[in-house]
């Protein structure tokens, strides 16, 4: 009987410690590693001629990010930067227009945001061959209650110039 009691006391002390490890901490909201997903896909462009690459992004459901041209100066814009790549001349990114969004607590204030899918276009001229440009998308994500610290998503843009 004493052995069963010891086992029950041990389980009572250990089980609460093991449950959060197995289930995750249910009292804290889940914070995604990234609020935006980049759909990397190889593209083809004509060699030595101006062409346009399309970079496809998706903001996770329940979130939005400030557009490239937010309506307030204190808001952090979504911005794509590309590193120089041998054999590639890249122009300035072309961003889509943002969608108008307002919060329930201040419906008169309109924000320019991206939600769901959006595409950033990159004008390029490239020498023939397979190419990869490295870049980063900097953004600030928000939900209906709060905005989160800015994040940077590292991307690769593979394409072939034929």
Image (cartoon, rainbow, N blue to C red):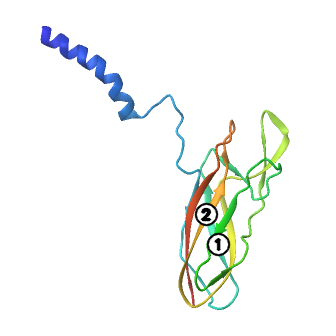
Residue, disc 1 = 54
Q: Residue at x 65, y 91 (%)?
A: 48
> Residue 114 occupies which quadrant of the picture?
bottom right
Q: Residue at x 69, y 71 (%)?
A: 121
Q: Are marks 1 and 2 in contact (CB under 8 Å)?
A: no
> Residue 20 occupies which quadrant of the picture?
top left
Q: Earlier in the sequence, mark 1 or mark 2?
A: 1
Vertical arrangement, residue 94 with respect to residue 23, above or below: below
Residue 19 % position (x, y): 35, 28
Residue 136 % position (x, y): 61, 63
Is 157 displayed left or right of 13 in the figure?
A: right
Question: Which SS class for mark 2?
Answer: strand
Q: Residue at x 29, y 22 (%)?
A: 14
Question: Real-space Cα distance between discs 1 and 2?
Answer: 15 Å
Question: Which SS class for mark 1?
Answer: strand
Residue, disc 2 = 136
In front of the other: 144 or 71: 71
In front of the other: 134 or 27: 134
Residue 60 % position (x, y): 59, 50
Vertical arrangement, residue 6 with respect to residue 143, above or below: above
Which mark's residue is nearer the viewer, 1 or 2? 2
Is 66 displayed left or right of 59 in the figure?
A: right
Task: Looking at this view, name the residue that lies furthest to the top.
Answer: 1
Q: Residues within 10 Å of mark 1 (few under 14, many from 20)?
A: some
């Amino acid at each position: 009987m004493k052995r069963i009691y010891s086992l029950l006391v041990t389980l009572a002390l250990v089980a609460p410690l093991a449950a959060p490890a197995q289930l995750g901490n249910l009292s804290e909201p889940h914070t995604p590693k990234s609020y935006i997903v980049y759909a990397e896909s190889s593209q083809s462009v004509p060699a030595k001629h101006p062409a346009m690459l399309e970079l496809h992004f998706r903001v996770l459901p329940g979130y939005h990010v400030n557009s490239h041209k937010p309506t307030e100066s204190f808001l952090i814009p979504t911005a794509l930067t590309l590193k120089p790549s041998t054999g590639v001349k890249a122009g300035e990114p072309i961003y889509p227009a943002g969608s108008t969004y307002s919060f329930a607590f201040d419906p008169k204030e309109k924000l320019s945001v991206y939600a769901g899918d959006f595409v950033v276009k990159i004008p390029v001229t490239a020498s023939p061959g397979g190419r990869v440009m490295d870049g980063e998308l900097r953004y600030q994500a928000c939900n209906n209650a709060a905005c989160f610290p800015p994040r940077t998503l590292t991307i690769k843009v593979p394409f072939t110039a034929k």
